[in-house]
């Protein structure tokens, strides 16, 4: 028999040292739900969509995807001490879901992918306030979705690189500094509507500058290792293994 709980999430807040503090947060749903002790919900668990997930730290708070019956799955914030849990913005109003996901912190902001009927699934950003939670860019036309995925911080530049899809480029590498003008195609590796499917992005510093290494496909090399410094000229095939 599964245990029943009156809180819906538990997070680990790490300080500057190695010690971690586990904080139990209030039940956003205001009800008990059955949970499995496994780290992953079972397919038969009909309440798995109510679970809080994808936590990312922003200052003294954490940003995450949460659920309530009134808002559906939306972007929430919780204080490090667990004293408050707040809805940041009901992006898709009412009980419908915006399904925020792919959270990553860069330059004092948290970037994520979210859906709304007017724009489809696009890139969003938050500074941890309702006013500062906004759509970054509608990369695909109107209600079509660019489906940003594999969001990765480009070191300390405050920028992120990610995969997005448009009719003109296919699934390619994009970059954003959190502004509409600063969000654009970084390199059309696949050329035209063909896709390079950039993925497995990992940021690092080589001692001189911030870089992101990733896998991408090209007709000449197949699936190989690529690297970018955030510029078109600096986005290149690293090695054809």
Image (cartoon, grey):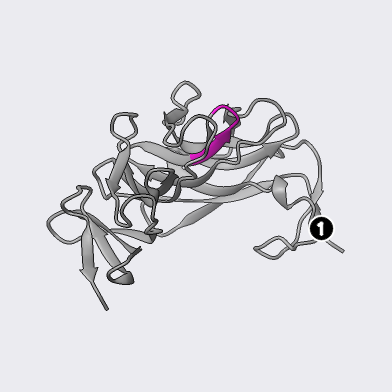
Q: Can see residue 201?
A: yes
* Crowd class of label 1 (few under 14; some 14 to 19; many from 20; radius 10 Å): few
Q: Residue at x 34, y 71 (%)?
A: 222
**Residue situated furthest top in the rendering:** 131
Main SS, magenta region, reads strand
Q: Give SS at disc 1.
A: loop
On the rendered structure, is 233 left or right of 196? left
Residue 238 magenta-highlighted? no
**In the image shown, does 223 or 212 lie closer to the viewer?**
223
Q: Residue at x 34, y 36 (%)?
A: 108
Percent position of residue 146, x then y: 47, 42
Percent position of residue 19, x then y: 45, 57
**In the image shown, does 191 or 34 lie closer to the viewer?**
191
**In the image shown, does 183 or 210 lie closer to the viewer?**
183
Q: Can see residue 78?
A: no
| Number of marks in the rendered image | 1
**Residue situated furthest bottom in the rendering:** 241
Q: Quadrant of the N terminus?
A: bottom right
Image: magenta residue range? 113-118
Q: Residue at x 56, y 41 (%)?
A: 100
Q: Residue at x 59, y 49 (%)?
A: 53
Percent position of residue 121, x then y: 53, 39
Percent position of residue 223, x then y: 35, 70
Q: Which residue is mark 1?
A: 3
**In the image shown, does 167 or 16 lie closer to the viewer?**
167
């Amino acid at each position: 028999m599964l245990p029943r709980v009156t809180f819906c999430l538990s997070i680990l807040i790490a300080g500057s040292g190695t010690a971690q503090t586990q904080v139990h947060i209030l039940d956003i749903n205001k009800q008990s739900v059955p949970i499995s002790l496994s780290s992953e919900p079972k397919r038969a668990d009909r309440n798995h969509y109510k679970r809080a997930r994808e936590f990312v730290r922003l200052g003294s708070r954490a940003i995450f995807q949460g659920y309530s019956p009134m808002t559906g799955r939306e972007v929430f914030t919780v204080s490090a001490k667990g004293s408050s849990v707040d809805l940041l913005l009901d992006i898709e109003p009412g009980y419908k879901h915006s399904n925020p996901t792919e959270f990553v912190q860069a330059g004092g902001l948290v970037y994520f992918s979210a859906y709304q009927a007017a724009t489809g699934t696009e890139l969003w950003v938050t500074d941890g306030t309702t006013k500062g939670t906004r759509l970054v860019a509608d990369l695909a036309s109107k209600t079509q979705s660019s489906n940003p995925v594999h969001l990765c911080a480009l070191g300390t530049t405050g920028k992120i690189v990610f995969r997005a899809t448009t009719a003109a480029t296919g699934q390619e590498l994009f970059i954003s500094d959190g502004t509409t003008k600063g969000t654009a195609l970084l390199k059309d590796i696949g050329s035209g509507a063909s896709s390079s499917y950039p993925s497995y992005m990992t940021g690092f510093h080589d001692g001189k500058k911030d870089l992101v290494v990733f896998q991408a496909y090209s007709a000449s090399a197949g699936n190989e290792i690529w690297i970018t410094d955030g510029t078109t000229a600096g986005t290149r095939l690293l090695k054809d293994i």
